[in-house]
Amino acid sequence: MKTDHCDHCGQVVFFENVQCVKCGHLLAFLPDEMQIGSLEEAEDGLWRKPDAKNNKARYRLCANYTEHQVCNWAVDSDDSNPLCISCRLTQVIPNLNEPGKKEAWYKLETAKRRLIYTLLALKLPITGRLEEPETGLSFEFLSDPEPGTPDAEPVLTGHDNGKIVINIAEADDSEREKRRHAMHEPYRTLLGHFRHEIGHYYWDQLIKDSPRLEAYRHLFGDERADYGEALQKHYKDGAPADWNERFISTYATAHPWEDWAESWAHYLHMSDALETASDCGLHLKPARSDEPKMKATAIPVGKQPDSFQVMVNNWYPLTYVLNNLNRGIGLPDGYPFVISPPVLDKLRFIHETISANANPVLRTKGLKAVRV
Ligand SMILES: [Zn+2]
Ligand SMILES: [Zn+2]
Ligand SMILES: [Zn+2]
C-alpha cells in the first residue's frame, strides 16, 4: 500500500480515511490515479482535485460512500454506474435490518477494497459478473441460517466459477478468532480470506486453460484428484507431519487447488507489505554485518528476471523486524510462517504467472481499462 498525502495541506492520509484531520477536506480513493485524493466541490454536485486547472477529471462518490458510509472510493463522472469498481462487484450484501450487520458489511468492503487495490497494482485483469455472467467476478456476503431452521446448511466461504462467498460471521473478530483456534491456524483474517478465494478465481483465469497448466501440476500436484474426497480426508486425518517442508500452511496440503490459493494469498501478502515498506522508505542498517539488512524497493512487478529474487531478499529482513516489533509490544507474530524451498518455487511461479499476465494498459488508462 502506498503512503498518500492530502492534496490541500500535505498531511499524511490513509487508505480508509474519509476526511483530512488537518484541513477537513473530504477524501476519496481515486482509482484512475491509484491514490487517495482530497477533493473539493465542483459543478453539478461533482468533485474535483484542487489542481483542477490542469486536471479536468471530475468524480462522483460511490453510492455506498454517500448512502451507507461503508466505502470511500470515487467514480469517474462519466461512468454511469453509481457504485465504485469495488462495490459493484458485490452482489449480495448483509441484511442491514439485523443488529451488527452494517458494521460487518463495512469490515467486509474495507478488506475487499484492499484486495482490489492490490489486484490493480499488480495490473491483473478483473472481469465482473455483469460483463461475463458465467465466470465473471462477484462477491456474496451471506449469513448462516438461524439456529433451528430445518435442513439449513451453514454458509461455506468459498469460490465457484468467479462467485466468491464470504460467511459474514468471519467479520466478527471474536467469532473468527474462535474458528482460528478450532482449526489450529496461526493466521486468519478477513483480508486473508479475500486473498485466498481470489486465488481460485485467478487459477481459473490464468492456469486452467493456459500452457502453464503442466508446470503448475509439477509444482502443486494434479488438481484432477477428487476435490470432495481430498477435503474429507484432510478434515479427518489432518496434514502430514512434514507439511511445513513443502507447504505454506496445513490447509494447503488438502488439495492442489488449495495449495495454489494459499500460496497465491501469501504472494499478495508479500507484495502488499513490501510496497508499504518501500513507500515508507524502510531501511534496516544493523550494526553487525551478519544481521538482516534491507533497502525496500518498489514493487517489482514485471518481466525483469531477478524481480522475484528482489522480493525475497527484502522479505526475510522485513518479516524478521515485523515479528520482533510485535513481540516487543506483546503481540503474536505478525508473520507466523516459514517459507521452505519448495514453497519458494511455488511463489516464484505465481510471480511469473502474474508478471506474464500483467496488463500495462490498466496503469495508464486507469479503471476505464478494467472491464467490470
Ligand atoms: Zn488536508
Ligand atoms: Zn464503493
Ligand atoms: Zn480454497
Image: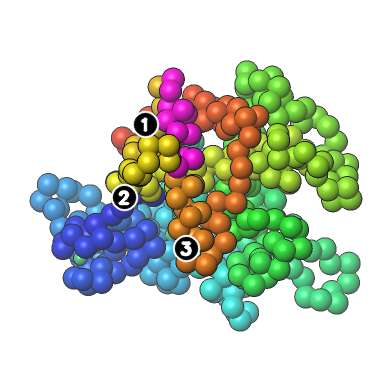
Q: Say which residue label 2 marks.
A: 280
Q: Say which residue label 3 marks.
A: 328
Query: Is the residue marked 1 within 8 Å of ligand 2, measured from its CB?
Result: no
Marks 2 and 1, how far apart at CA: 27 Å
Res. 147 visible in picture: yes
- Residue 315 magenta-drawn? yes
Camera-nearest residue between 295 and 101:
295
Magenta region, residue range? 305-317
The amino acid type found where label 3 is placed reads Gly
- Mark 1 and mark 3 in contact? Answer it, CB < 8 Å: no
Q: Residues within 10 Å of mark 2 (few under 14, many from 20)?
A: few
Circle 3 sits in a helix, a strand or a loop, which is it? helix
- Residue 90 magenta-drawn? no
Rendered image: mark on residue 361: 1
Residue shown at the point (44%, 45%) measured from the top left: 318
Instruction: Tell me residue 5's x, y (percent).
Output: 24, 57
Residue 366 in the image: above or below residue 138 = above
